Each structure stands twice: as structure tokens, then as C-alpha cells.
Amino acid sequence: MNPGIPKIPPPIYFLASIIVMILLNSAAPGGRWLDYPWRYLGIIIMIFGFYLSLGSGILFRKLGTNPIPGTQAKVLVTKGAFRFTRNPMYLGLITILAGVAILLGSFSPLIVIPIFSWILHTQFVLREEKWLEGWFGESYLEYKSKTPRWLW
């Protein structure tokens, strides 16, 4: 494990975010922005996010690299969803949260998504990028120059 990795792993932040979204929806919804049946689109988005995150994690394992943050990568993964984004597992979690927000259909759960994204970015992504530069050098820098951090 690398020094400086947060003690709380991303899945805990993710689960806490879902709980907070549900509590906000119940206690202080702030009005509805989406009604049925359109809210069911959230399920499709959640499934896509789950597939993106889980599929990318499985690809890591298949290629012999541990997906746990802070564990030294053995292989620079550039296949699958990693061709389009350097962080498909994290993007999948954010996508699931967007699906949850759509399913809930009220305004207040929406505030959780940028907070969760900020935590991932500042606590994990930026640190992991430095580690990957150290582990893979020029190969990672080339990949980084061609592939966006998220989708933009």
C-alpha cells in the first residue's frame, strides 16, 4: 500500500452517499424535478454504472492488477472502458449515484453527486495519477495525454 491513501475506501463513501441521498429525499426533498414513469430511467442508468464499474474492476483482475486504491499496479490497463476514461470504476460509481438521484426524482439528493465526485477526485484520483506516473513513467504519460480523466 502506498502512504497517503485515505483510510476510508471509495465503496464506503459510495454507500454513505446513497444513504444520504435517500435520507435527503425523505426529510427534505426540495421539490420534484422528475415524475413517474420517467424516474424509472434511473434504474437503467444505475445498471449502466454498475456494469461500467464492475466490468472495469474485473478487467483489472483479469490482467493481474489489484483494483484496490493504493495497491501497486502491475499492468497499465488501457483496454475496455479505459480507452475512453482513465477512471471508469469511479465514473461508474458516479453514474450509479446519478441513477439513484433520477429514481428518487427530488432536488436534494442531487447535491450529493458533486460532493462524492470531489471526494473521489481529491482523495483518490489525483494521488493515483502521481503513483501511476512513478510506476509506469512515459507509458502512463502517453496514455494520460490521449485519454481523458473522466469523459471530457
Image (cartoon, grey):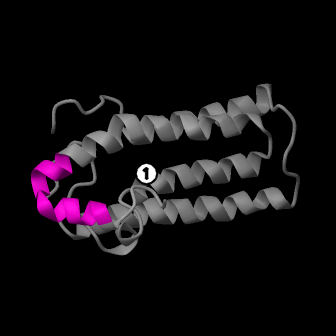
Q: Position of residue 65 (x, y in %)?
A: 19, 60
The residue drawn where x is 36% and y is 74% is 80
Front residue (pair 122, 45): 122
Q: Identify the main secondary structure in magenta.
A: helix
Q: Quadrant of residue 69?
A: top left
Whether the magenta-drawn stretch holds residue 40 is answered as no
The residue drawn where x is 28% and y is 70% is 78
* Circle 1: element type: helix
Q: Amino acid at mark 1?
A: Tyr
Q: Which residues are magenta?
A: 131-145
Above or below residue 116? Residue 142 is: below
* Quadrant holding the N terminus: top left
To which residue does mark 1 refer? 90
The residue drawn where x is 66% and y is 65% is 44
Whether the magenta-drawn stretch holds residue 132 is answered as yes
Q: Is 99 left, or right, of 36 in this rendering?
A: left
The residue drawn where x is 30% and y is 30% is 6
From this viewpoint, is residue 76 visible? no
Q: Position of residue 89 (x, y in %)?
A: 41, 56
